[in-house]
Image (tube, grey):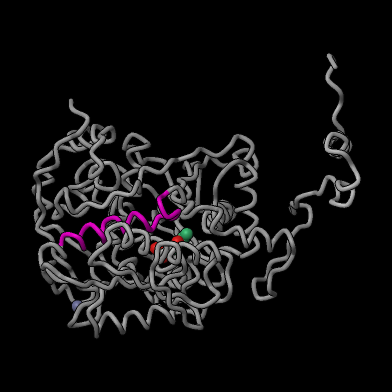
């Protein structure tokens, strides 16, 4: 078996399918919303029944074999090429190391503390440090395919962002280069300094407006409707496809056995949870898994439209956007999720197969979100605030009796470092009142100065070293080595 596996020969026959009116559109153009009804799209492979002719066992074997390939085009999310975007060729595929992120089982002490078996999947260990890279790798591969096909000369890629979409879009655009040029639109002051530094560093044009994400989204939607731009928000259905790889990787890690597992996902624009449900449904349809895992969506009390929708009785649910309040789960601070219609459709399909209770949405408090993040990170995990939101969601699900002894797999959607500012605010008790967070001083951590600069000036170099060491000894209460 060669390590550079040959590229798959299967090609799909893909179409955009409108979830509003079932209209179908060819994929040789960029579409974001249905020209007829403004509905959102999912991409469908009309040849999918061809894939069903291969047994689940044969698929599992193929994907397991591909996990060892050194062919970059098949190393990332396109390990699952046939289920992803089987219209792009090997040369189109952009691989920057996305996907294949580790699943880290809870540290023994953390597991004992929360009294539940759980693991984090660290999607912060993607190239731009969030799961958004999964979707961008797919969207940019398809874009490269289109650009080559039409011989386009200038392509402006644009997105609105709570921070991570723009970081990811700018990174992939910078890598692909001409004729792509990246423009990102951010809510002024509502992305972290680290997230802002990312598109700036990648050389994107960074535009800001006052307001929140939902305001930015309206502007880029207007642009996408009236001008020639490539929209990279999750309205772009190619991003949803790429993000399905999260589900495929979780299933593969647990040897394709999803029985007794529950996946916790933070919901912002709802693209990620849509993709994860799509992914598991595909695996199920091909017989690659025979049980669907349970899915728990988690929302902050400060941005909870999806929670509110599912909290209503089954037969009289009405969707309404909410006005968001400041949230430490800032990347999910969205009041009118673009992918809500997708969630609705997918949940119906998911529940039809898996029964009531297979899909749940829980709502969590800001205080719990930040403290869950701190708790996870103090036990050696690398959780962002949205990963903390998932842990808060697990605790809430336990309190409400919604979860039994299932293994909980929590999505740490970004790297903790991107949200270090919220950790600082907690430690320094400097949150604005609107967050509704009262820090516990016992959890604060701060650097301790061992010796002052003035004192340093008075001492010789060697005396300074000894004095500093003596101060450390006093601080820590160290006892001498027996042989010294
Ligand atoms: C985008 C994002 C989310 C929300 O995901 P959606 O697909 O918008 O629901 C959660 N966490 C992080 C870190 C993100 O960047
Ligand atoms: Zn339509």
The kind of secondary structure the magenta stretch mainly shows is helix
Magenta-highlighted residues: 126-145
Q: Residue furthest front?
A: 460
Q: Total of numbered circles in the picture?
A: 0
**x, y percentage for residue 284?**
25, 46
Q: Quadrant of the N terminus?
A: top left
Note whether residue 392 is visible.
Answer: yes
- Residue 434 appears at what percent x and percent y? 65, 76
Vertical placement of residue 331 versus 39, above or below: above
Residue at image position (29%, 66%) is 345
Tell me if residue 260 comes above or below residue 23 in the rendering: above
| Image side of residue 102 versus residue 140, left or right | right
Query: Which residue sits furthest top?
Result: 483
Among the 4 quarters of the image, the one containing residue 302: bottom right
- Across and down, in percent, residue 156 comes to 27, 73
Is any part of residue 401 visible from this angle? no
Question: From the image, which quarter does the C terminus lie in?
Answer: top right
Residue ID at (50%, 49%)? 403
Indicate whether 337 appears above or below 177. Answer: below
- Residue 214: say if magenta: no
| Quarter of the rendered image showing ligand 2 | bottom left
- In the image, residue 134 lies in the stretch drawn in magenta: yes
Could you say which quadrant of the image residue 128 lies in? bottom left
Place of residue 8 in the rendered image (x, y in percent of width and height, measured from the top left):
13, 42
Closest to the observer: 181 or 75? 181
370 lies left or right of 262:
right
């Amino acid at each position: 078996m060669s390590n550079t596996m040959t590229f798959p020969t299967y090609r799909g026959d893909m179409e955009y399918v409108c979830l509003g009116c079932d209209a179908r559109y060819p994929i040789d153009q960029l579409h974001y919303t249905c020209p007829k009804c403004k509905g959102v799209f999912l991409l469908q492979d009309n040849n999918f029944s061809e894939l069903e002719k291969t047994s689940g066992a044969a698929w599992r074997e193929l994907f397991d074999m591909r996990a060892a390939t050194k062919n970059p085009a098949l190393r990332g999310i396109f390990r699952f090429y046939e289920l992803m975007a089987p219209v792009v060729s090997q040369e189109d595929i952009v691989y920057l190391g996305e996907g294949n992120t580790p699943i880290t089982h809870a540290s023994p002490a953390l597991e004992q503390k929360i009294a539940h078996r759980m693991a984090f999947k660290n999607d912060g260990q993607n190239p731009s440090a969030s799961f958004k890279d999964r979707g961008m790798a797919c969207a940019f591969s398809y874009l490269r395919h289109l650009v080559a096909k039409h011989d386009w000369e200038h392509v402006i890629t644009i997105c609105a962002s709570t921070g991570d979409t723009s970081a990811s879009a700018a990174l992939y655009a910078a890598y692909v280069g001409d004729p792509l040029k990246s423009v990102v639109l951010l809510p002024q002051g509502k992305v972290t300094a680290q997230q802002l530094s990312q598109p700036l560093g990648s050389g994107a044009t960074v535009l800001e407006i006052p307001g929140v994400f939902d305001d930015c989204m309206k502007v880029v939607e207007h642009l996408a409707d009236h001008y020639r731009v490539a929209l990279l928000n999750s309205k772009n259905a190619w991003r949803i496809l790429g993000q399905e790889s999260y589900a495929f990787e979780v299933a593969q890690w647990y040897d394709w056995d999803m029985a007794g597992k529950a996946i916790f996902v933070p919901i912002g624009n709802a693209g990620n949870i849509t993709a994860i449900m799509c992914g598991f449904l595909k695996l199920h349809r091909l017989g690659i898994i025979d049980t669907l895992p349970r899915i728990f969506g988690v929302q902050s009390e400060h941005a909870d439209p999806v929670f509110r929708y599912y909290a209503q009785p089954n037969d009289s649910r009405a969707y309404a956007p909410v006005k968001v309040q400041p949230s430490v789960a800032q990347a999910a601070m969205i009041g009118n999720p673009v992918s809500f219609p997708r969630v609705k459709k997918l949940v119906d399909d998911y529940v039809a197969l898996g029964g009531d209770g297979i899909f749940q949405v829980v709502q969590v408090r800001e205080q719990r979100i930040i403290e869950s993040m701190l708790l996870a990170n103090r036990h050696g995990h690398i959780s962002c605030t949205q990963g903390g939101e998932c842990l808060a969601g697990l605790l809430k699900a336990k309190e409400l009796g919604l979860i039994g002894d299932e293994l909980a797999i929590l999505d740490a959607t970004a790297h903790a470092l991107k949200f270090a500012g919220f950790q600082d605010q907690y430690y320094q008790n400097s949150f604005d009142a609107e967050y509704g967070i009262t820090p516990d001083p016992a959890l604060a951590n701060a650097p301790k100065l061992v010796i002052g600069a003035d004192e340093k000036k008075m001492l010789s170099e060697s005396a300074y070293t000894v004095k500093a060491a003596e101060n450390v000894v006093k601080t820590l209460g160290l006892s001498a080595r027996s042989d010294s």
